[in-house]
Image: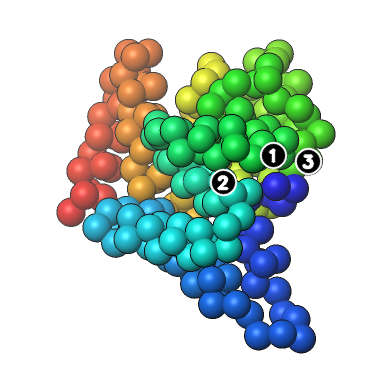
Amino acid sequence: MRNLFVITLFMFICACSSQPIPQWKDTSSRQLENYKVNFLADKEDATEPHFAQAKKAISSNNDLNLLATIYLNKYALHTAALEDFYDGEFLRIDKLQPNAANRAYYHLLKGNFGQIEPDKLPANYSKLLPLMADKNLSAATREIAAISDPLSRLVACGVWIKYLPYDENILQLAIDTAAQYGWRRPLWAYLTHLKKFYSERLETSKAENIRERLELLKK
């Protein structure tokens, strides 16, 4: 899992070759992409069937490492939207077929920063580890903003906001990223979190502005 986001693994397994692409590769790639698109758009009813189809296709190859990656994709999307996730299936897979890179990414998504092997994470995430240890929010916000892949950037925002002290700047970074790509589910989550942030600090006017914005976006 050396890429910025684990979903890019499927760009590799579906890469052009002299042989026809096996059906399971084509199906898993398309279904996982559909799952991602529907999840981010907050189309709940259309989301899980695509994940189930991607999982079924991957299972045809009998490769637990690839199966683990689709669960990590799922967990990363939930993290990008500030949601918790059930990790039981990944842990079962990891017990049977351990993979250091998968485990490092899993620990990042769970906030187990002290258990991460830095060299097993993608470079942009590994650079965040010392900032997480120091809780250096301003430096982390700059580092996250420099991540070129928007979904990886949003995952990094989600990890920080879920497990470490945060401010309105990193929330705004996540809001801007989600809004730029029309990702309604994380956009709504971060706006709601920003409203809570202002309310807890008795910044009533700012909190009310976010509440009104949410009401308008709901229509």
Around disc 3, counting alpha carbons within 10 Å, would you say few (fewer than 14), some (14 to 19), or many (20 or more)?
few
Compare residues 186 and 102 and report the one nearer the observer: 102
Q: Secondary structure at mark 1?
A: loop
| In contact (CB < 8 Å): disc 2 and disc 3 | no
| In contact (CB < 8 Å): disc 2 and disc 1 | yes
Instruction: Name the residue type under label 2.
Output: Ala
Would you name the residue on which mark 1 appears?
A: 99
Estimate the spatial distance between the alpha carbons at disc 2 and disc 1, rounded to whole Å: 9 Å
Which quadrant holds residue 15? Answer: bottom right
Residue 86, visible in the rendered structure? yes
Residue 37 locus on image (x, y percent) = 43, 61
| In contact (CB < 8 Å): disc 1 and disc 3 | no
Would you name the residue on which mark 2 appears?
A: 68
**Residue at the spot x=59%, y=32% of the render?**
95
Of the residues under marks 2 and 3, which one precedes in the sequence? 2
Residue 55 locus on image (x, y percent) = 46, 57
**Residue at the spot x=34%, y=14% of the render?**
200
Query: Viewer-nearest of labels 1 and 3?
Result: 1
In the depicted structure, whether residue 79 falls above or below residue 4: above
